Image: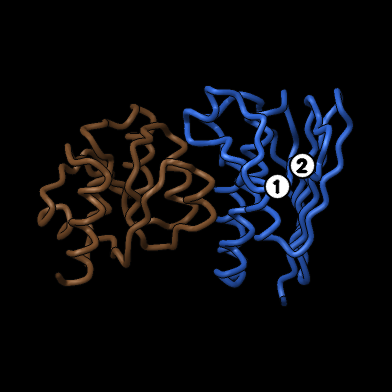
Amino acid sequence: MHFEFNVEGGNFSKAGTASSQLKKILKQLNVDPRIVKRVVVALYEAEVNIVAHAFSGTIYIDIDTEKIEIKLVDEGPGIPDIELAMQQGYSTASPEVREMGFGAGMGLPNMKNNTDRLLVTSEVGKGTTVEMTTYLNS
Amino acid sequence: MKVKEIAEKLNLTVICGGNGLDNEVNGGYSSDLLSDVMGSAQAGNIWITLQTHKNVMAIASLKDLAAVILVKGFLPDADMEAQSNEENIPVLGTNDETFEVNGKLFNLLNGK
C-alpha cells in the first residue's frame, strides 16, 4: 500500500494531518496498537520538522505485511551537522516556533526512540530526507 | 475516573468538547513542550498546559488523551476549540496555576 502527503512549510494549522491519516489507516489494518503509537509519534515529529524548518515537503508511506516505511523529503535549508541535531535539547527553531511549545530539541530523539531504523540525510541549501522503518513483527 | 467527574470535583469549566466528558482518565501529564507530551504522555491521561493553539488538539488526538486542562484562565484559540469538538476531547478551564491543578488532580486520582 502506498500513500503520499504534501506538507506546507510554516503552516502549523495543518501540522499532524498526515500522522492523523496514518493512524486511521493503521487502525483499519488492525496493526498492533503499540506499534501504531510509536509510528504516529515518529511521523508527527518528522511532519512538524518540515513545517517548522522547510519550505515544503512530501511524505511517502509504504506498508506491507512486514514493515511500515516512511520517507519524508523536504526542500529547505538542510541540516549542517546531523549528529548535533540528533542531540536532545539542540534546536535551531525560531522564537515564534518555540513560543508554541515546539523547538525544544526533542523531535529527532523522539523519532529515533519510536522507530526501528532512522536515517537522516541532508544537503545544506537544498533539503533533508528522513527515512524511518518500523517492523510489524518486532 | 471520568472527565466529567474530575471537572465537577475540581470545579473546572467545560469550554468545549463536551461530547467527550465520559472519556476515562487514568492519570495526568503536565508540560508546555509539545514534543515532551508527544514522547511521554500516556493514552488516557489528562494534559495540563497553558498552550492554546490547534496543535494541542492534534497531539491530544494522536496520543488518545482523555482531555486537556488550560490553566490560569487561558482560553483555546477558535481552531483549537473546533478540533476539540470534532475529536470529542474536552478542553477544561481553570483560574488555578499548573502547580495547584497538578496537586488537586493528583490527590483526586489517588483518592487522597
Seen in the image, is A133 located left or right of residue B54? right
**Quarter containing the C terminus of chain A:** bottom right
The residue tagged 2 is A84
Q: Which mark is residue A87?
A: 1
Q: Residue at x 58, y 35 (%)?
A: A103
Dot 1 falls on a residue whose secondary structure is: loop
Residue lying at the far right of the rendered structure: A123
> Is residue B57 left or right of A129 when viewed as pictured?
left
Q: Quadrant of the N terminus of chain A?
A: bottom right
Q: Any idea which chain is the blue one in this picture? A: A
Mark 2 is on which residue type? Leu
Callout 1 environment at 10 Å: few (<14), some (14 to 19), or many (20+)? some
Q: SS of the residue at dot 2?
A: helix
Query: How packed is label 2: few (under 14 Cα within 10 Å), some, or many (20 or more)?
Result: few
User: In the rendered image, what is the letter of the chain coloured brown?
Assistant: B
Left or right of A92 in this view: B33: left
Residue for point 36% across, 43% down = B86
What colouring style does the render use? by chain
What amino acid is labelled 1 in the image? Gln
